[in-house]
Image (cartoon, rainbow, N blue to C red):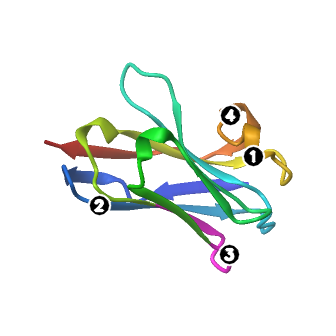
Amino acid sequence: VQLQASGGGLVQAGGSLRLSCAASGRTDSRYATGWFRQAPGKEREFVAAFRGMNSNTYYAPFVKGRFTVSRDRARNTDYLQMNGLDPEDTAVYYCAVSRSPGIIAGRIRDSAEYAYWGKGTQVTVSS
């Protein structure tokens, strides 16, 4: 499985970006796609996830309704729509695919549950 993340860039505070994660080499839509981010000097953290088994979505508390994950199954592509961006959201954003289609909800925020990772896309939010 290969993942290609795109859509990052520079945006002013309050602006929006939509990140895309295109998957190749796998067409099983049951897998979960997770979004993580890593800011300079900080550990990688969970942002959001789309669980393919039941189309449930999961978000980190700091998202506070600003971000939305979705999936286009026909295109084998996941999206992270980010609105109301804040300078604190500045980071490299990664998408990842779960090791198993049966990933349980309680583990969906754990990066160790994801086997395939994209290269990341930079998101910079200016104040």
Other-residue count near label 2 (Cα within 10 Å), few / some / many at <14 / 14–19 / ≥20: some
Q: Position of residue 9 (x, y in %)?
A: 29, 53
Structural distance between the alpha carbons of marks 1 and 3: 20 Å
Q: Tell me the quarter of the picture where residue 6 sits.
A: bottom left
Nearer-N-terminus badge (1/2): 2
Report the residue at 23% width, 45% height from top: 125
Q: Which residue is mark 2?
A: 16
Where the C terminus falls, by quadrant? Answer: top left
Report the residue at 69% width, 63% height from top: 24
Structural distance between the alpha carbons of marks 1 and 2: 28 Å
- What secondary structure is marked by label 2? loop
The residue range painted magenta reads 72-80
Structural distance between the alpha carbons of marks 4 and 1: 10 Å
Which of the two marks, 1 or 3, is nearer to us in this view? 1
Which of the two marks, 4 or 3, is nearer to us in this view? 4
Q: Which residue is mark 1?
A: 105
Other-residue count near label 4 (Cα within 10 Å), few / some / many at <14 / 14–19 / ≥20: few
- What secondary structure is marked by label 3? loop
Q: Which residue is mark 4?
A: 110
Between 70 and 56, the one nearer to me in the picture = 56
Q: Position of residue 14 (x, y in %)?
A: 21, 54
Report the residue at 19% width, 49% height from top: 13
Which of the two marks, 3 or 2, is nearer to us in this view? 2
Compared to residue 102, the image places residue 112 above or below, namely above
Structural distance between the alpha carbons of marks 3 and 2: 23 Å
Q: Which residue is mark 3?
A: 73
Q: Position of residue 1 (x, y in %)?
A: 74, 54
Tell me which amino acid carries mark 2. Ser
Tell me which amino acid carries mark 3. Arg
Labelled disc at residue 54: none
Q: Is residue 74 magenta?
A: yes
Compared to residue 86, the image places residue 51 above or below, namely below
